[in-house]
Amino acid sequence: MHLTGRRRRRLLVPSVLAAALTLTAAGLATASGAGADTVTAPTAAGDPLQREVDAIRDTGTVGVLADVRASDARQHARAGTAELGTGRPVPWDGRFRIGSATKTFTATVVLQLVGEGRISLDDTVEHWLPGVVRGDGRDGSRITVRQLLQHTSGIPEVEGDIPSLNSASGYEAERLRTYTPEELAALAMRNPSTAAPGTFAYSDTDYILLGMIIKKATGHSWAAEVNSRIIRPLRLADTSTPGASPYVPGPHAHAYRAFGTGTAIDVTRINASAFDASGSIISTSADLGRFFTALVSGRLLAPAQFDEMTTTVPAPELGADYGLGLGTFPLSCGGSYYTHPGGVSGYQTWVAVTPDATRTVVLLATGDGDTSTEAAMIRLVDREMCRGGGK
């Protein structure tokens, strides 16, 4: 649900990733050795970043924003419109739903609690949430917190049970419906398991359960803990946990989906409780980049917990390796970067940070795009990461 607007369109399937990296490799031969970008103004027509942003727009997205930062330097570009029929550009400081990038916030809180001795990665789901994981042979006493974080729990996805995410009529009828985490978990348990525990299978339900465990361990909601432990200390003034609110506050680009009909509808307004701890956070490119930079530079987790977060397993369906709420993606120029792409209700987000935390890329696209949108997003992130030397 939150890697792209629809789980049916997997982000970074291996064939798409390989094709995109092949396309970019030749063009990056010289760029990969370049120094930090010193451009601080919006890009001009013909600039390489602007061309990449235009290419994403041309795949059928409505609006695109790219924000590249290295030390104190910044380069940004945009294309398309913030709202169909208006001609208004995507605001530089616009807020957007970050989708599955929320999972990295949730995972960070869980790992902080692990560092404090309040949760163990080897704790079972049954220990914290008795009777919640059941049905189709599932046994919560044999599934651990680590497996939830790494999507190796075998717990089924809940997205197909949320009408507002699956059809235009469902969106119109239920976009303002409020869900509790318990309701979402119960809906997921009606579905058959798609993988055995220990096998990677991406599931938003894993992080809904982690949000419930955070509340059990602290007495506070996952959102309250994210606010007190991450948002306020890092001064992420434009980042919020909207709860059941359907609005994106402040300046923002509108989100659009066609649900396979060929006619895009505005889906910006939707009750965020449907995404919960797996994908409901709203942020900006500046705030999202600041969070990932702080995480990778060691400001949020002790070394032992960050090592756990970045110990990965192969994630073939993503075309990458996946740790505990953080992915590692390969670069065409060598090396890799940390990320957690996201997409929800008409917003597609990609954030990337080098392992030395010196360079970040945050990319936003609105609308469904087409089958080439993912490859175009991959090319932009790959190129901009490699411009910093692929560190």
Image (cartoon, grey):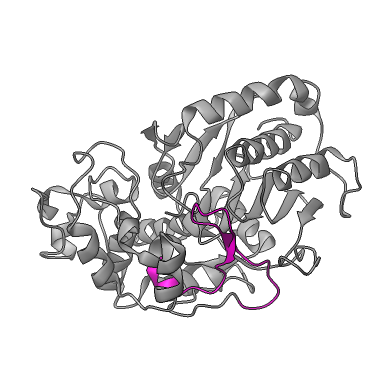
Instruction: Specify whether 221 is left or right of 168.
Output: left
Tell me the quarter of the image containing the C terminus: top right
Whether residue 117 appears in this view of the structure is no
Q: Residue at x 19, y 39 (%)?
A: 196
Residue 355 on the magenta segment:
no
Tell me the quarter of the image containing the N terminus: bottom left
The quarter of the displayed image where residue 89 is located? bottom right
In this view, 317 is above or below 9: above
Image coordinates for residue 14, horizontal then vertical, percent:
48, 28
Image coordinates for residue 270, horizontal then vertical, percent:
49, 73
Q: Residue at x 62, y 26 (%)?
A: 21
Q: Residue at x 55, y 24 (%)?
A: 18
The quarter of the displayed image where residue 239 is located? bottom right
Image coordinates for residue 338, horizontal then vertical, percent:
54, 41
Whether residue 230 appears in this view of the structure is yes
Instruction: Specify whether 50 is left or right of 217.
Output: right
Q: Which residues are magenta?
A: 249-276
Residue 270 on the magenta segment:
yes
